[in-house]
């Protein structure tokens, strides 16, 4: 049968795709249905037809799934922020566990029996809401041209108004409403992406969960804050924001580019400190508006704890932490290792990593700026660097081939791989296995409840017979 756009099809949802969309089959033809969950029988409206599958959206829920729950957020369907809030949390974890094992088996080529035997249960959250320590809210206009903020609808830049996302901190509401109030009061415009006109682009809010400290950074379409211009607005706004309990840093950031990149490179502190602090385990981090920092601190501690557990450090080891960001994992491991080396491509992150090491009195951690696939081969070629354990935590695209190749040459006893994309993880593990490593441990950590994303930590050991020759 031929399917057409806008056609209504009745389908039962049996599986879930990578982004949390429901998958059902009609005569062998797969339908990816937005907002439908496993167990639903639905009428779906087709939005896009491909050769052997089609995209659709939930039109009418005929028989709701027994795993359906009432979402806490009124705009969860329109908003692109989360995808599976309508699924019970238990089922969300089950879905993520299956997604990881499925990728390891299908893409990694690992036997199902092995994965079943070694994979540990997903580490979920006790309370899977209000977990985000950071959010970036676009400021713009709704359909009636009222000034508003919220989140973009999926795949568009239409703002779905919402100042109190249930995944975010409850303080967001007061901060955002204060900013909207003064913008309206003083007739300050929001930035318009099409024309490039208007002043306020985004508001970045961050909280240190352990310190309670709050940071607000307002991103504006200007080169600087010209004296006299909008002076009342800034004075009154900053005064009001500074009175919010636990406010620690109020700043602006300049971004004049026509781009989707939210933050510009330059900024100015208007009140308080240029950073907030947060503590994970026994390490304290300074976080500025531009720093990369994991967004779910409760789960981050569990994630790093798992990486530490899998590294099985005794205190004598040399550890390389590739894709180290601001040195979070490196510094977390430093207390249990002889020496840690971190590699990261963003210079500012390495600056933060060194600063964080100094602040915490950690002397056995050294950091290098550069691409892992360039720094590692160069150091191995020139200095014959050595590692007992290599930890990698790459972005979604996974490790570069050259990086994997050098890891195999260095032949550490253990590799710990922290991944935010189990498909590229599986691809990379296949290469490492072909090079003599054996997969020993796998465990997922749910860093992003309500969404389709999942973080995984694995541990491999070297099992080749030529171990001595390699060293
Ligand atoms: N381990 C850190 C950061 C993980 S995110 C933490 O948990 O906080 C991945 C990091 O890899 C980012 O900081 C990104 O800037 C960095 N990165 C991306 N490509 C890289 C490359 N080719 N070489 C080194 N670092 C890279």
Image: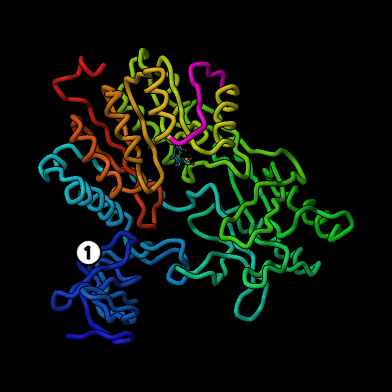
Compare residues 361 and 168 and report the one nearer the observer: 361
**Among the 4 quarters of the image, the one containing residue 309:** top left
Quarter in which the C terminus is drawn: top left
Whether the magenta-drawn stretch holds residue 362 is answered as yes
**Residue at 18% across / 35% down in the picture?**
434
Q: Position of residue 458 (x, y in %)?
A: 28, 36
Name above or below for residue 29 compared with residue 461. Answer: below
Q: Is residue 281 above or below residue 140?
A: above
Segment colored magenta: 360-371
393 and 159: which is toward the camera: 393
Q: Is residue 335 shown left or right of residue 101?
A: right
Pointer 1 local density, CA inside 10 Å: few below 14, some 14–19, many at least 20: some
Q: Quadrant of ligand 1?
A: top left
Q: Residue at x 27, y 73 (%)?
A: 64
The residue sitting at 76% across, 44% down in the picture is: 271
- The question of residue 280 being in magenta is answered with no
Q: Which residue is mark 1?
A: 15
Looking at the rendered image, the quarter that the N terminus falls into is bottom left
Which residue lies at the image location 14% right of the left edge and 38% below the top edge?
117
Q: Is mark 1 within 8 Å of ligand 1?
A: no
Q: Residue furthest top?
A: 316
Q: Nearer the viewer, residue 458 or 146?
A: 458
């Amino acid at each position: 049968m031929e399917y057409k756009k806008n056609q209504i099809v009745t389908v039962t949802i049996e599986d879930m795709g990578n982004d949390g969309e429901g998958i059902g089959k009609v005569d062998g033809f797969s339908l990816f249905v937005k907002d439908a969950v496993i167990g639903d029988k639905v009428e779906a409206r087709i939005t896009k037809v491909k050769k052997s599958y089609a995209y659709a959206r939930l039109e009418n829920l005929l028989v709701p799934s027994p795993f359906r729950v009432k979402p806490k957020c009124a705009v969860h369907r329109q908003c692109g922020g989360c995808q599976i809030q309508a699924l019970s949390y238990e089922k969300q974890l089950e879905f993520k566990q299956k997604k990881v094992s499925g990728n390891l088996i299908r893409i990694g080529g690992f036997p199902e029996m092995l994965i079943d035997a070694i994979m540990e249960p997903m580490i979920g959250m006790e309370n899977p809401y209000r977990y985000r320590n950071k959010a970036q809210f676009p400021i713009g206009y709704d359909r009636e041209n009222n000034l508003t903020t919220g989140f973009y609808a999926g795949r568009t830049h239409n703002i779905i108004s919402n100042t109190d996302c249930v995944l975010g901190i409850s303080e967001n509401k007061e901060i955002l409403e204060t900013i909207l109030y003064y913008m309206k009061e003083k007739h300050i415009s929001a930035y318009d992406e099409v024309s490039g006109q208007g002043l306020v682009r985004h508001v970045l809010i961050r909280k240190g969960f352990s310190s309670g400290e709050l940071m607000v950074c307002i991103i504006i379409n200007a080169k600087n804050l010209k004296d006299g211009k909008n002076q009342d607005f800034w004075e009154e706004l900053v005064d009001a924001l500074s009175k919010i309990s636990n406010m620690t840093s109020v700043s602006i950031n300049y971004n004049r580019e026509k781009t989707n990149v939210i933050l510009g490179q330059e900024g100015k502190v208007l009140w308080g400190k240029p950073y907030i602090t947060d503590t994970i385990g026994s390490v304290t981090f300074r976080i500025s508006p531009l720093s990369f920092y994991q967004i779910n601190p409760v789960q981050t501690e569990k994630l790093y704890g798992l990486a530490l557990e899998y590294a099985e450090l005794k205190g004598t080891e040399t550890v390389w932490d590739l894709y180290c960001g601001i040195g979070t994992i490196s510094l977390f491991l430093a207390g249990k290792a002889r020496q840690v080396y971190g590699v990261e491509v963003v210079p500012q992150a390495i600056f933060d990593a060194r600063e964080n090491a100094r602040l915490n009195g950690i002397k056995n951690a050294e950091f290098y700026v550069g691409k892992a696939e360039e720094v590692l081969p160069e150091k191995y070629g020139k200095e014959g660097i050595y590692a007992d354990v290599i930890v990698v935590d790459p972005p979604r695209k996974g490790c570069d081939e050259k990086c994997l190749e050098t890891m195999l040459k260095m032949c550490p006893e253990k590799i710990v791989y922290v991944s935010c994309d189990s498909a590229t993880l599986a691809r990379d593990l296949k290469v490492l296995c072909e090079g003599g490593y054996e997969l020993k441990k796998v465990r997922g950590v749910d860093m992003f409840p309500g969404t389709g994303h999942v973080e995984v930590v694995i541990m491999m050991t070297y099992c080749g017979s030529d171990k001595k020759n390699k060293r």
